[in-house]
Every structure is written in C-alpha cells, then in structure tokens.
Image (cartoon, helix red, strand yellow):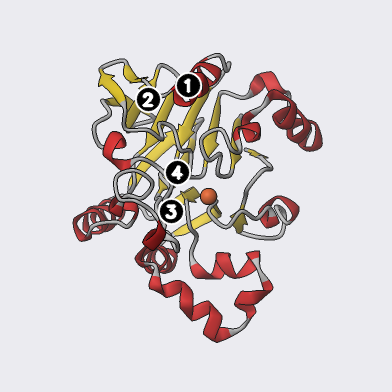
C-alpha cells in the first residue's frame, strides 16, 4: 500500500508521518499499517532545510542538528519516504543529490529510504502509474532570504516544462494518479470558498506552476490528482466523490 499525505515542513508537521497518525488513517480506511511500503509527501518536505550538509552517494549528512534528528527519525521508518518538490524545499541541495534508478525512472537520494521524486517524471509504484509534478510560487517570497528560506527554482524553467510535455507526448497520456505541490486551479477552488469568486480564482494564475498544471489537466487523463500546499484536508473528506484531492495532515491509502 502507498500512503499519501500533505506538507511536513521539516519538523513542523512531521507528525503527518507519525505511526499514531498513520495508524488512525489506516484504521479508517481498513488497511493494515504494516502493508505500507511507501509514504509520499506532497511537497514542502523541507529536509534538508539547512544547506550546511555534505552530500555523497549515500545521500545527505546534515550538520544542522534538527535536520540530523529528523533524518534519523525517518531512517527508522519501515517504509520508503518519497517527497514531491514543494516551494519550501531547499532546491540548492536537492539539485546536488545523487540520482538512483527507482520505479522505472530516476529519483534523488536523501538516504537509504528517503528520496525526492523528480518533477515531470513518470513512475510506476506498486503497479500504479504516477505523473509527478511539484513546485509552487511562494506568496511571501519578498520577506524570505534567497538560498536560505526561498529558492527561485520553486517555479519550473521553460526547459523543464518542455521536457515534461515531450515525455507526455511520447507515452500514453493516461495515469492512475497525478501528484503535485500546488494544484490545478479547479482543484484549488475546492479548498476555500474564497475561490468561488471568478476574480479571486484568476489570482491563482500569477503562479506559473498553476498555469502549467492547468495546461496538463487539459491534456491528460487520470483517476485522482493529489496535491498539498493549500494546507487543506478537503480531499480526505471527499475522497470518493472528487478527482481533485488537496491533503494536509490526513493520509490517503492507495
Ligand atoms: Fe506548505
């Protein structure tokens, strides 16, 4: 089984992946906790947060004690942890992580059981086909410090978008699941009544990631699109009815 949950923000929301929280979600969905082989975090994984860490073929070796503690905690988990890239993620380190083959493509290695999923990649995990996106524009970037608490790579480059579109053109464009950090605008609208107003909804298009997600949404077919960023568990409450699934603290088992 695969467990999918929302932003963990380094240690801030690490309880998303606590055994207690996960077991409650397993119980509600009638799944055995020990059947989980992978837990996916929908962006803002936030590990490492500090750039102060060595990187080699084994992954990261943080100097910062919070990052070191968190990595140790994750390394004790009996499943793989797979992170989608968000906006509060240290792209300077992510870009230097070693690539390893996994799920029919390449992932970026943080440690033996912790990996970042690459943007624009297609993965097959437990016989399910995933399109993985990621990123979001930080609304508060003016108050953040570049390379310390904000990274411009949070928005895709044109080359990344072109490579993703080419990949989708080559393969069949149907997927079981799409995973992203911010969502497509139709999905985001479900998280807050604020977006029921057409003008407010249009504001979302200031984020080039949302614009790209909307484009993909019109090009591909899929069963469910799961995303984080909006800190809403609307998707958990409406799992059966909706194909758009915003998640934060709750976890969906597939
Ligand atoms: Fe977040």
Residue placed under numbered mark 3 in the picture? 174
Mark 4 vs mark 1: give the one in front: 1
Which residue is at 29% across, 45% downward? 147
Closer to the N terminus: mark 4 or mark 1?
Answer: 1
Horizontal placement of 43 versus 26: left or right?
A: left
Camera-near label (4 vs 3) is 4
Q: Which residue is mark 2?
A: 110
Q: Which residue is mark 4?
A: 130
Q: Residue at x 49, y 25 (%)?
A: 66
**Residue nearest the observer in this picture, 200 or 79:** 200
Pointers 4 and 3 in contact (C-beta within 8 Å): no
Label 1 environment density (alpha carbons within 10 Å; few <14, some 14–19, many ≥20): many
Instruction: Decide if residue 254 is on the left or right side of residue 238.
Output: left
Q: Earlier in the sequence, mark 3 or mark 2?
A: 2
The picture quadrant where one finds residue 58 is: top left
Marks 1/2: CA–CA distance: 9 Å
Which residue, given by chain and number where applicable, does mark 1 sit on? 71
Q: Quadrant of residue 5?
A: top right
Verify CB contact (< 8 Å) between mark 1 and mark 2: yes
Residue 175 visible at all: yes
N-terminal of the pair, mark 1 or mark 3, is: 1
CA gap between label 2 and label 4 equals: 21 Å
């Amino acid at each position: 089984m695969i467990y999918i949950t929302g932003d963990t923000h380094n240690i801030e929301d690490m309880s998303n992946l606590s055994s207690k929280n996960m077991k409650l979600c397993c119980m509600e969905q009638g799944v055995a906790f020990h059947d989980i082989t992978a837990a996916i975090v929908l962006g803002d994984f936030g590990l490492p947060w500090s750039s102060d860490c060595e990187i080699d073929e084994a992954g990261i070796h943080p100097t910062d004690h919070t990052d070191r503690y968190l990595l140790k905690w994750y390394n004790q988990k009996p499943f793989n942890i797979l992170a989608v890239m968000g906006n509060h993620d240290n792209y300077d380190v992510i870009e230097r992580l070693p690539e390893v083959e996994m799920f029919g493509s390449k992932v970026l290695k943080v440690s033996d059981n912790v990996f970042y999923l690459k943007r624009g990649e297609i993965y097959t995990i437990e016989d399910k086909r995933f399109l993985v996106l990621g990123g979001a524009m930080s609304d508060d970037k003016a108050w953040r410090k570049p390379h310390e608490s904000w990274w411009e790579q949070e928005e895709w480059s044109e080359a990344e978008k072109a490579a993703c579109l080419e990949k989708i053109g080559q393969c069949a464009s149907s997927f079981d699941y799409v995973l992203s950090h911010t969502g497509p605008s139709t999905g985001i609208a479900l998280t807050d009544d604020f977006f029921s107003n057409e003008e407010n909804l249009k504001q979302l298009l200031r984020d080039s990631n949302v614009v790209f997600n909307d484009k993909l949404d019109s090009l591909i077919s899929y069963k469910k699109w799961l995303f984080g960023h909006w800190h809403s568990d609307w998707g958990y409450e409406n799992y059966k009815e909706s194909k758009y699934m915003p998640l934060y603290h709750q976890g969906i088992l597939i």
